[in-house]
Image (tube, helix red, strand yellow):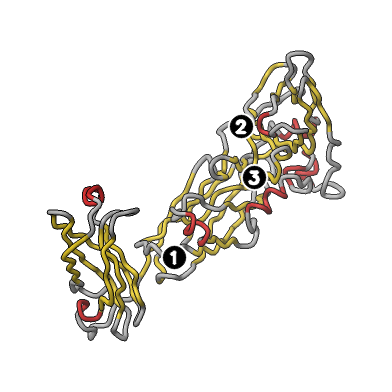
Amino acid sequence: MDRRQYLATAVGLGAGSLAGCNSYFADETDTAGTEDRSPAESLTGGSSGTRSPAPPNTLSAGSYTVTLSNPRVRASIRDAGVHVDVRAEHGSQFLLLDAETGDARVEEIPVRVVSDGEPITDRLSLVGRPDRKTAGVIGFPLPVSDYGTVAVVLESAEEPARWRVPDATVEMLSRTPEFTVDGIEVPDSVQVGESFDASFTVANDGDRDARFLAEFGHTLLSDTGEVEVAVPVGERRTHTSTIDPFYDESPAEIPVILDWGLQARHATVAVQRETATTDLPPLSDALSIESSYPIDGTMVNVGVGGTARNTSTSALMNCVIVASGDVGEQRFSATTRRDRLEPDQPWDWEVAFGDEADAQREPVRNITIETPAEPPG
């Protein structure tokens, strides 16, 4: 998928989700969410509904200095790779921390997590896309367990620096949500160009309130947007997104995915298209070739280009142009197609004859162009 198509595509998000990635990244430093509360407050709501965040702790060891703050636990994260993807691991949760360094990249600081002095992990993920390379959210996957003490250690060849994670956060590492999704609700079909609603219902049968994080939307692009839904223990929540696909490539169906890292659900929506009326003239008459020119092969494949136009009063479907020409001593022929052309709409078309012709670097001679009729629809 090219960059133009990527930028032209949007996925609308319904209530109860995030309006975009930036909203989530801001929320990663928010201590008011249900997963950021102490165990008692998470279950009962607490007297104020939130707890006071742990104060920042600055660690210095060797040439590194890092300030850590806002510890919390997540069942899954947005992992910053080529794209921002939802990441979850069976039997593990993520310890998240806000981190700020002096001049080192956040994801490259030498830190690990230990419990009662024994190493747990040194696998560090950068969560989301931070605005600065020296400040962001880091996440450590930790096995679900009843830990004694947990500490983050900044490594050094000399004396390492250590910060003990608050007990209330450590206790959250032993309790997990358990999400269940039956499937995705989508319409059977839509007309080409139409947006549509897609929804899912998620239940939390675990032992703590949590946020259900998932990629949800169409997969006509390489990167699907994310949604987040707060789901209390023992309850179900329904989320609806408005899907606005990019139709320029005229797909026959729109694939929709819900992927929360551990499992995924899929659905498809058929795309219905209008058909040309039966009293249209033959396509070869209605599709007029207004101009043509040879492509000389200097920068692109040898071929033919030009302008065509729909001269009828109705839309044309399955428009086909067949171009032929002599390149050197050989005759070449190729086809280009357009699914739909509106009345009086121009079509700037090009037909390339391929690498073999391209290698000859010769102009096209004796051009012939045809617009064979095809059944409408």
Q: Is residue 185 above or below residue 92?
A: below
Q: Amino acid at mark 1?
A: Pro
Residue holding disc 3: 129
Q: Secondary structure at mark 1?
A: loop
The label number, if any, that marks residue 133 in the structure image: none
Judge from the rendering whether residue 146 lies leftward or rightward of residue 361; answer left or right: right
Mark 1 nearby-residue class (10 Å; few <14, some 14–19, many ≥20): few
Q: Amino acid at mark 2?
A: Ser
**Residue drawn at (57%, 62%) of the image:** 12
The earlier-in-sequence mark between 2 and 3 is 2
Judge from the rendering whether residue 262 lies leftward or rightward of residue 53; answer left or right: left
Residue holding disc 1: 187
Q: Nearer the viewer, residue 76 or 350?
A: 350
Q: Nearer the viewer, residue 181 or 116?
A: 116
Which quarter of the image is occupied by the C terminus? bottom left
The earlier-in-sequence mark between 2 and 1 is 2
Residue 350 on image: x %, y %: 30, 64
Q: Secondary structure at mark 2?
A: strand
Residue holding disc 2: 92
Image quadrant where residue 99 sits? top right
Judge from the rendering whether residue 13 lies leftward or rightward of residue 164; answer left or right: left
Q: Is residue 161 visible?
A: yes
Total label count? 3
**Residue drawn at (69%, 39%) of the image:** 133
Q: Nearer the viewer, residue 34 or 180?
A: 34
Residue 42 on image: x %, y %: 76, 44
Q: CA distance from mark 2 to mark 3?
A: 23 Å
**Disc 2 or disc 3, which is closer to the eye?**
3
Q: Secondary structure at mark 3?
A: strand
Residue 75 on image: x %, y %: 63, 39
Q: CA distance from mark 2 to mark 1?
A: 36 Å
Q: Amino acid at mark 3?
A: Arg
